[in-house]
Image (spheres, coloured by chain):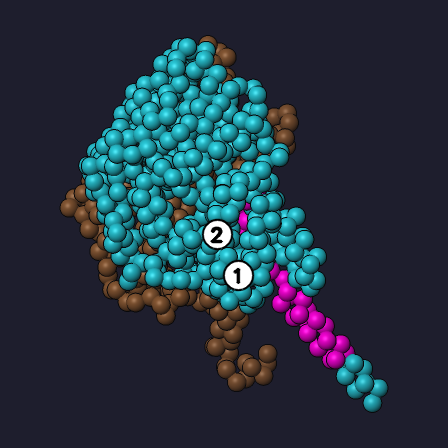
Chain colours: A brown, B cyan
């Protein structure tokens, strides 16, 4: 290393240490993005780059060919806009529910309750399940002759065809994804709660502060950095939602639960002939949306550090 | 000196081992198949016999889910990867990946046995004379009817030649009288819907390979939607699911929750095993529409792929499986309709199947001569799957009030044209 340092000079040495990581980023992140850009401006259902003719912005024009962007039915790629619209509704609802429920669970599990370890394990179990198993399990529960309707019938109530109506199907889509992943965020939030010094709470207790006041004035502010991490992870995961819903509803009823990743998958892989170019263009647009989210997160993070 | 000798010995051993491994690999074939009907399970005894007659050849039958054969295999093939051979059902859509088996098989025998279905495998090139694979079995879609429910309701079972509307009327009466959940159900599959559409006069594709949206298709969609709106059919299958997702609820028929189930011949062995004599059932002759009394043909084929490094070995294996005796043995175990002409003419015995199942097979086979030309044309069309996916997606949207029927039909045409354009660029 000393020899290398003599040749390169001390100023260039950090680049030597960064080189392995830089190469990894180049090959596993930047190169796929470049390939994606290439596919989005080429046509044909062939995979090999040499067999894909350049078609310029045709795929983007297909996606953006709309008379009224607020009405998906006026768009040439109506399903893309429906999926994008669904994602824009699904992501905020799911993130708010996920963080709310995970925080509630973490606060409960942070208390001295009997069987706390078992409860923590129970909350974490769904995280270990494959998304397909989660979806199939809930399908058995929610389908017409499923377990939930069995219970309703046993109670003398009318069964409900949960996955047939757009609103209930959307509700269960959010519910199932929150159920499946909240354990992960609960554990992170629990670790954050446990890092808050006890003496702060003791001081609040001496001042006779109410539980709500303790939560809003002590717990939440001190948990803010962890909450921010959870928020970012949650948003990324939410935008990526695919597997559970693909198995549970297939994007239905109609296109009520079709999210943007399912649209990309169907166009690129499920529907034949495969339109890799259109799928690549749609995924790049999704990348742009994610970049906007990341920018917002960076700004929030900066404000939080300064504030 | 000693070190050099050890080095030489090690190098030669390594070379020999590499060479031997190479030979062993050269004789190993991987075949993808699923475990339903003519698949890995039923082929296994014949393949074992082939291995014993051809020492040094190892055939690895890899059981994969049907969904993987439909969705993952084409992507593998496109990237030049995948098995040496596979049993596939998208006969025309994958045609550009097939190996021409002509030099390795008894070509005359293949032409004689499979003249009709070989053409489906030539998909994108109608002038081709290549032998691209061995059609394994024919499938026929059709309706299963619960006769016990008809009897309980005191309703006469519609006779051969009855229309879809008459079947709907009769099954509704039965469902009402017996408190059965639904009158009719149909797999969420463009292939199954095509039966209804063609019997209503839909052409789906013309002689030039262009999609056709006509009055027949519109009538069929409107009728289909009406059956969902009035509760004749459940929303679970076509209404609750979106996109190109395939869904079947044959379990509803197995559990007597529907009077009629429109599925296909491939579930016969399941009926035989799971229902047996729990209730009386039969396969109904193809319901008629205003245009014809047709169902859709279908089937699988054992094909070799161009990228294989052992084309001759692949060809010989397929040729062996295609021999009448071996083919009959597998078809018999699979309880399916043979694709080979001689087996259709001479008949196949199904020793493990019940009398009712054998009768049902006969009913399915009897539908083959009645199939409309449009059904064969659609089945062999390269863009068949694009249209089937568009049909399932758009009909589901109509059922959920996202689209009107006319708009949905425009979308179907647009979806297929986009697919054709994308593939042709």
Residue at 42%, 43% in the rendered image: B298
Q: Residue furthest left?
A: A67
| Position of residue B383 in the picture relative to residue A196 (left or right) | left
Q: Residue furthest bottom?
A: B1
Q: Is residue A69 above or below residue B177?
A: below
Residue B24 visible here: yes
Q: Chain of mark 1?
A: B
Q: Position of residue B265 (x, y in %)?
A: 47, 36
What is the span of residues highlighted in magenta in the rendered image? B10-38
Between B154 and A218, the one lying in front of the other is B154
Q: Which mark is residue B106?
A: 1
Residue A148 appears anywhere in the view: no
Residue A14 left/right relative to B52: left
Magenta highlight on residue B27 = yes
Given contact means CB atoms under 8 Å apart, are the residues at marks 2 and 1 in contact?
A: no
Magenta span contains residue B1: no
Q: Which element is circle 2 on?
A: helix
For mark 2, name the chain.
B
What x and y, as percent, mark residue B86? 52, 54
Please tell me how crowded label 1 is: few (under 14), some (14-19), or many (20+) other residues with Cα within 10 Å. Answer: some
The residue under label 2 is: B113
| A32 up-or-down from B254: above or below | below
Say which element carries label 1: loop
Residue depicted at x 48% and y 16%: B148
Q: Residue at x 83, y 89 (%)?
A: B1
Mark 2 neighbour density, 10 Å: few (under 14) some (14–19) many (20 or more):
many
Quadrant assignment, res B155 = top left
């Amino acid at each position: 290393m000393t020899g290398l340092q003599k040749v390169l000079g001390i100023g260039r040495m950090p680049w030597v240490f960064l080189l392995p990581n830089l190469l990894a980023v180049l090959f596993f992140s930047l190169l796929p993005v470049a390939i994606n850009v290439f596919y989005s401006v080429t046509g044909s259902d062939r995979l090999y780059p040499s067999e894909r003719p350049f078609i310029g912005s045709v795929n983007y024009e297909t996606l953006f060919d709309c008379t009224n962007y607020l009405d998906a039915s006026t768009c040439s790629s109506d399903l893309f806009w429906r999926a994008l619209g669904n994602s824009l509704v699904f992501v905020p609802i799911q993130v708010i529910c996920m963080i709310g429920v995970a925080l509630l669970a973490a606060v409960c599990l942070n208390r001295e309750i009997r069987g706390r370890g078992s409860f923590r394990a129970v909350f974490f179990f769904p995280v270990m399940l494959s998304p397909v198993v989660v979806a199939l399990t809930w399908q058995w529960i929610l389908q017409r002759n499923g377990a939930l309707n069995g219970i309703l019938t046993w109670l003398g109530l009318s069964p409900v065809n949960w996955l047939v109506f757009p609103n209930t199907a959307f509700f269960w889509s959010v519910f199932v994804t929150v159920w499946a992943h909240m354990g992960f965020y609960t554990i992170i939030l629990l670790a954050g709660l446990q890092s808050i010094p006890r003496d702060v709470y003791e001081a609040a207790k001496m001042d006779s502060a109410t539980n709500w006041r303790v939560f809003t004035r002590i717990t939440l502010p001190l948990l803010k950095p962890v909450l921010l991490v959870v928020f970012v992870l949650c948003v990324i995961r939410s935008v990526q939602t695919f597997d559970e819903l693909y198995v549970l509803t297939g994007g239905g009823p109609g296109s009520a639960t079709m999210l943007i990743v399912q649209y990309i998958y169907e166009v690129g892989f499920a529907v034949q002939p495969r339109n890799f170019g259109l799928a690549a263009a749609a995924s790049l647009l999704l990348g742009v949306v994610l970049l906007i989210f990341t920018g917002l997160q960076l700004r929030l993070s900066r404000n939080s550090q300064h504030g | 000196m000693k070190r050099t000798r050890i080095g030489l010995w090690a190098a030669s051993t390594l070379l020999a081992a590499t060479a031997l491994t190479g030979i062993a690999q050269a004789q190993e074939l991987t075949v993808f198949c699923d475990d339903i009907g003519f698949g890995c399970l039923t082929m296994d005894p014949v393949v074992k016999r082939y291995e014993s007659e051809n020492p040094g050849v190892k055939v690895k039958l890899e059981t994969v889910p049907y969904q993987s054969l439909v969705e993952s295999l084409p992507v593998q093939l496109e990237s030049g990867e995948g098995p040496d051979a596979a049993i596939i059902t998208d006969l025309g859509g994958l045609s550009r990946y097939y190996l021409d088996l002509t030099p390795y098989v008894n070509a005359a025998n293949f032409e004689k046995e499979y003249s009709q279905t070989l053409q489906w495998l030539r998909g994108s090139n109608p002038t081709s004379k290549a032998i691209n694979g061995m059609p394994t079995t024919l499938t026929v879609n059709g309706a299963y009817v619960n006769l016990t429910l008809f009897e309980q309701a005191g309703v006469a079972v519609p006779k051969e030649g009855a229309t879809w509307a008459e079947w709907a009327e009769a099954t509704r009466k039965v469902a009402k009288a017996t408190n059965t959940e639904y009158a009719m159900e149909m797999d969420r599959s463009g292939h199954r819907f095509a039966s209804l559409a063609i019997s209503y006069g839909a052409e789906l594709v013309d002689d030039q390979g262009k999609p056709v949206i006509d009055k027949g298709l519109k009538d069929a969609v409107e009728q289909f939607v009406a059956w969902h709106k009035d509760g004749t059919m459940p929303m679970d299958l076509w209404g609750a699911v979106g996109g190109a997702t395939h869904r079947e609820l044959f379990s509803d028929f197995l559990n007597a929750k529907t009077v009629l189930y429109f599925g296909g011949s491939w579930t016969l062995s399941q009926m035989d095993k799971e229902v047996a004599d729990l209730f009386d059932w039969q396969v109904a002759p193809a319901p008629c529409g205003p245009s014809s009394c047709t169902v859709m043909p279908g089937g699988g084929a054992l094909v070799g792929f161009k990228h294989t490094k052992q084309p001759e070995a692949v060809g010989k294996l397929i040729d062996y499986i295609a021999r009448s005796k071996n083919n009959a043995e597998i078809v018999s175990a699979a309880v399916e309709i043979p694709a080979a002409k001689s087996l259709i003419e001479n008949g196949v015995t199904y020793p493990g199947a019940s009398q009712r199942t054998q009768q049902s097979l006969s009913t399915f086979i009897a539908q083959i001569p009645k199939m409309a030309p449009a059904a064969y044309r659609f089945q062999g069309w390269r863009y068949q799957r694009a249209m089937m996916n568009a049909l399932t997606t758009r009909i589901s949207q109509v059922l959920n009030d996202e689209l009107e029927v006319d708009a949905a039909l425009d979308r179907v045409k647009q979806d297929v044209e986009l697919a054709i354009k994308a593939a042709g660029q």
